[in-house]
Image (cartoon, helix red, strand yellow):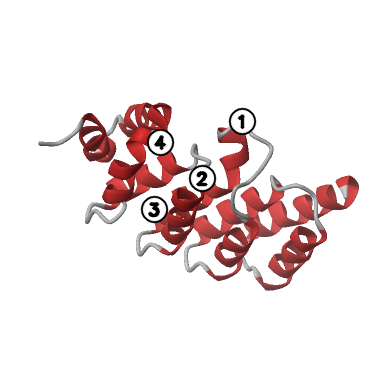
């Protein structure tokens, strides 16, 4: 017999998946086992929804699993995982990060085969607290990236980091 949370997780593949994401996120830790189980589902849409849900949690194990989704075979899953990791502090309305998202964002910004995932990774790097390592990563993006939009965002972000830092 499936639980309410498993049914919500199964609905993450529909057009109204954000409704299911918010319902699972509001359910808190009770929904995490169903979300963890759905992360290995064969439907990429369900994995993408799981990545969206996990951005709202402050559970360390869940965030580590979310980091694994940044290496998923489907670019839309990777993009949502990067977005959830990068926006996690804002989604949780919390000023701390249970895990450090910067290494995962950096890997995606520098090595992901999808330009859209790299753009999101660069953008979410800008939202991290000012630090020398973030500025260093943005300089590396400027030196290696060929996509014009990612370069523009990285350049702007570097200037902002230097102003704030």
Pointer 2 or 3: first along the chain: 3
* Of the two numbered discs 3 and 1 in the rendering, the one whose residue sits closer to the viewer: 1
What kind of element bears circle 2?
A: helix
* Of the two numbered discs 4 and 2 in the rendering, the one whose residue sits closer to the viewer: 4
Q: Provide the residue designation for mark 3.
A: 77
* Of the two numbered discs 2 and 3 in the rendering, the one whose residue sits closer to the viewer: 2
- Could you give the CA–CA distance between mark 4 and mark 2, rounded to whole angstroms? 17 Å
Residue 34, position in %: x, y?
28, 42
Q: Is residue 157 above or below residue 136?
A: above
- Could you give the CA–CA distance between mark 3 and mark 4, rounded to whole angstroms? 22 Å
Residue 81, position in %: x, y?
46, 51
Mark 3 nearby-residue class (10 Å; few <14, some 14–19, many ≥20): many
Q: Residue at x 28, y 33 (%)?
A: 15
Q: Is residue 16 left or right of residue 53?
A: left
Residue 103 marker: none
* Of the two numbered discs 4 and 1 in the rendering, the one whose residue sits closer to the viewer: 4
Pointer 3 or 4: first along the chain: 4
The residue positioned farthest toward the left in the image shown: 1
Q: Which residue is drawn at 54% across and 49% down?
A: 85
- Could you give the CA–CA distance between mark 2 and mark 1, rounded to whole angstroms? 13 Å
Instruction: State if disc 1 and disc 4 touch (CB < 8 Å).
Output: no
Residue 38, position in %: x, y?
27, 48
Residue 29 marker: 4
Q: Which residue is drawn at 42% across and 57% down?
A: 69
Q: Is residue 124 left or right of residue 29?
A: right
Q: Provide the residue designation for mark 2.
A: 84
């Amino acid at each position: 017999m499936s639980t309410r949370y498993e049914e919500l997780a199964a609905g993450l593949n529909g057009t109204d998946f954000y409704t299911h994401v918010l319902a699972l996120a509001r359910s808190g830790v009770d929904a995490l086992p169903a979300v963890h189980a759905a992360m290995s589902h064969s439907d990429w849409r369900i994995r993408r929804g799981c990545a969206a849900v996990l951005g709202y949690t402050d559970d360390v194990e869940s965030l580590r699993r979310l980091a694994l989704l940044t290496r998923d075979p489907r670019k839309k899953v990777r993009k949502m995982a990067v977005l959830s990791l990068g926006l996690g502090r804002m989604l949780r309305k919390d000023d701390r990060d249970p895990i450090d998202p910067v290494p995962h964002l950096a890997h995606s910004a520098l090595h992901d085969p999808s330009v859209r995932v790299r753009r999101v990774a660069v953008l979410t790097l800008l939202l991290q607290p000012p630090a020398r390592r973030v500025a260093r990563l943005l300089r590396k993006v400027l030196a290696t990236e060929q996509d014009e939009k990612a370069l523009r965002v990285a350049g702007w972000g570097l200037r902002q980091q230097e102003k704030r830092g």
